[in-house]
Image: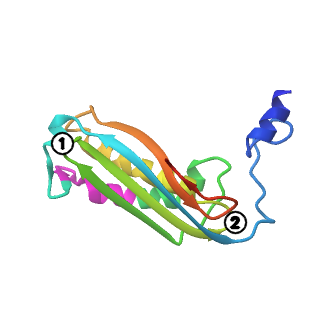
Amino acid sequence: MFARESARMLSHIDAKGQPAMVNVGAKAVTRRTAHAVAIVSLPPELAALLSDGEIRTKKGPIFHAAVLAGVMGAKKTSDLIPLCHPLALDDCQIEIKPDVTLAEIAIHCRAETHAKTGVEMEALTGATIAALTLYDMAKAVSHGIVIKDVRLLEKTGGKSDYRAK
């Protein structure tokens, strides 16, 4: 009973309840976009280092490294997420927006492709890997960094569009 119910609810579970890649062979290639965000809360000692839109430590400029890592992560999504289709990205942009009053960093990842399947996982992976890189480079200052609220904000293309409320 569970296997059949799961197969109807989850796209990556087959009729026997086993993991399965979704067959996108019959789908048309269309323009797909996605926008994801990861919010990173900074402890006071790290927030104090924020200057001119960047945090510089002995390891170097953290945001620059996070942007590069986020793009690299988005490009490698299918190597990290089982059953995720490999996609050639047409574009991937990481934008880091510090909010000094909240001691938070918003890491936005926008990804675009022309493919038979969506690019949401690439955008989510890009934002997450950028946040993890920020953590890695700043943990010498404080381990009190919190990565939270990683979520999809928008996706276009395919069967339906989505915009978070």
Magenta residues (range): 55-69
- Residue 47 - label: 1
Tell me, yes or no, if residue 18 can be seen here: no
Q: Is residue 51 above or below residue 8?
A: below
Whether residue 58 is in magenta: the answer is yes
Q: Residues within 10 Å of mark 1 (few under 14, many from 20)?
A: many
Name the residue: 53% across, 72% down.
90
Give percent across and percent down for residue 89: 54, 68
Q: Is residue 66 left or right of residue 142?
A: right
Q: Which amino acid type is shown beneath numbered disc 1? A: Ala
Residue at coordinates 79% horizontally, 64% vertically from top-left?
Answer: 25
Tell me the quarter of the picture where residue 66 sits.
Answer: bottom left
Contact (Cβ within 8 Å) of mark 1 with mark 2:
no
Q: Which residue is mark 2?
A: 116
Q: Which numbered circle lies on residue 161?
A: none
Q: Which residue of the protein is positioned furthest toward the front in this rendering?
A: 165
Spot occupied by residue 77 in the image (x, y as percentages of width and height):
55, 55
Rendered position, 113 above or below 7: below
Pick the front one: 46 or 37: 37
**Front residue of 101 and 20:** 101
Q: Horizontally, is 100 left or right of 112 in the view?
A: left
SS for tag 1? helix
Above or below for 18 versus 86: above
Label 2 Cα neighbours within 10 Å, binned few <14 / some 14-19 / many ≥20: many
| Amino acid at pointer 2 | Lys
**First reached walking from the N terminus: tag 1 or tag 2:** 1
